[in-house]
Image (cartoon, helix red, strand yellow):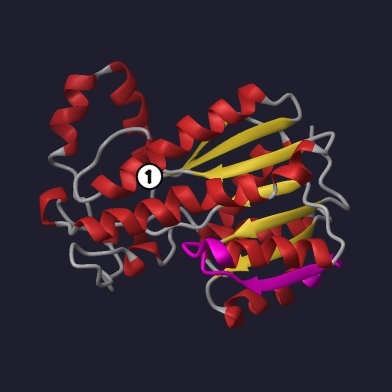
């Protein structure tokens, strides 16, 4: 069991949704926080909420698809004398369009935010990681990272890639443990910011999202999985059955996936 008290976690996408919930539940465990992502006001709201549990919290806005901004984040951590024990790689953006109606620039943007930015971040922090006795990584993937799904081609591809990179990383370094958080439908605003084929925002709350698991429950489950250093943790409701259907009844999965509403 991982003791989180007096550890320091860096959380991407910490200003809202799953990232904010994980931050709050880590704070309840006595874990100090570096919160990053978009929207300094939102990040400061998370910071203030977490500080009520007696921990130290820092907020720094970072445009994660800008590698220079990630360099600045690394410098900020070092200049403040912080050592990161836990990386919560949670930031991401979704999609709501068919593959052939999606401009390639959208594929590039989703891949950069959902996958490449986290890889760059981890490599930027490589000296700190390699010098540590133990480092815990929490990687937020998605149920859609386990299989393809309509209107999610770029999103699925980026989330698939996370498994390949971080599973390899864990096998290469004895001091690194990776927990893959695999959410299904969680009640957050992610569908509103999801990208259409032309790069504009979907700007709608999907019914499936609205009916999803409460985000605070998601955060509690996530932190419990991190403490137990689980390799993978499915989080959601009945939609999680699709993971097992895809694994054991592939033909049924193809029939169902064409009938389930993607929104």
Name the residue rendered at 18%, 67% in the picture.
198
- 172 vs 153, nearest the viewer: 172
Quadrant of res 180: top right
Within the magenta stretch, is there residue 221? no
Q: Mark 1: which secondary structure?
A: helix
Q: Which residues are magenta?
A: 51-68
Left/right placement of residue 59 relative to residue 140 reads right
Q: Where is mark 1, residue-wise?
A: 158
Please identify the quarter of the rendering in which residue 242 is found: top left
Residue at the image position 11 percent from the left and 50 percent from the top:
100
Q: Is residue 178 above or below residue 87?
A: above
Q: Position of residue 157 (x, y in %)?
A: 32, 41
Q: Report x, y in % for residue 164.
A: 46, 30
Q: Position of residue 132 (x, y in %)?
A: 82, 38
Residue nearest the observer in this picture, 5 or 160:
160
Instruction: Tell me what residue is drawn at x 31 percent, y 68 percent.
Output: 205
Would residue 209 be visible to someone looking at this image?
A: yes
Compared with 240, 35 (above or below) is below
Q: Is residue 232 above or below residue 224?
A: above
Q: Is residue 186 visible?
A: no
* Magenta span includes 60: yes
């Amino acid at each position: 069991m991982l003791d989180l008290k007096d550890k320091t976690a860096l959380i991407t996408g910490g200003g809202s949704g799953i990232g904010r919930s994980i931050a709050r539940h880590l704070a309840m465990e006595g874990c100090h926080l570096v919160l990053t992502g978009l929207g300094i006001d939102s990040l400061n709201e998370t910071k203030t909420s977490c500080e009520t549990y007696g921990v130290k919290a820092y907020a720094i806005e970072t445009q994660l698809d800008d590698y220079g901004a990630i360099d600045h984040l690394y410098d900020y951590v070092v200049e403040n004398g912080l050592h990161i024990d836990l990386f919560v790689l949670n930031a991401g953006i979704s999609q709501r369009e068919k593959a052939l109606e999606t401009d390639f620039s959208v594929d590039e943007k989703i891949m950069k935010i959902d996958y490449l930015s986290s890889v760059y971040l981890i490599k930027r922090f490589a000296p700190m990681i390699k010098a540590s006795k133990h480092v815990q990584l929490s990687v937020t993937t998605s149920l859609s990272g386990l299989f393809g799904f309509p209107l999610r081609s770029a999103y699925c591809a980026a989330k698939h890639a996370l498994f390949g990179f971080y599973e390899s990383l864990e096998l290469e370094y004895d001091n690194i443990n990776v927990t893959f958080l695999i959410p299904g439908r969680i009640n957050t605003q992610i569908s509103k910011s999801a990208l259409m084929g032309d790069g504009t925002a979907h700007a709608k709350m999907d019914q499936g999202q609205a009916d999803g698991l409460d985000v605070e429950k998601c955060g509690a489950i996530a932190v419990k999985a991190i403490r137990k250093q689980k390799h993978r943790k499915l989080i959601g409701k009945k939609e999680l059955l699709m993971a097992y259907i895809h694994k054991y009844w592939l033909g049924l999965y193809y029939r169902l996936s064409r009938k389930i509403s993607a929104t």
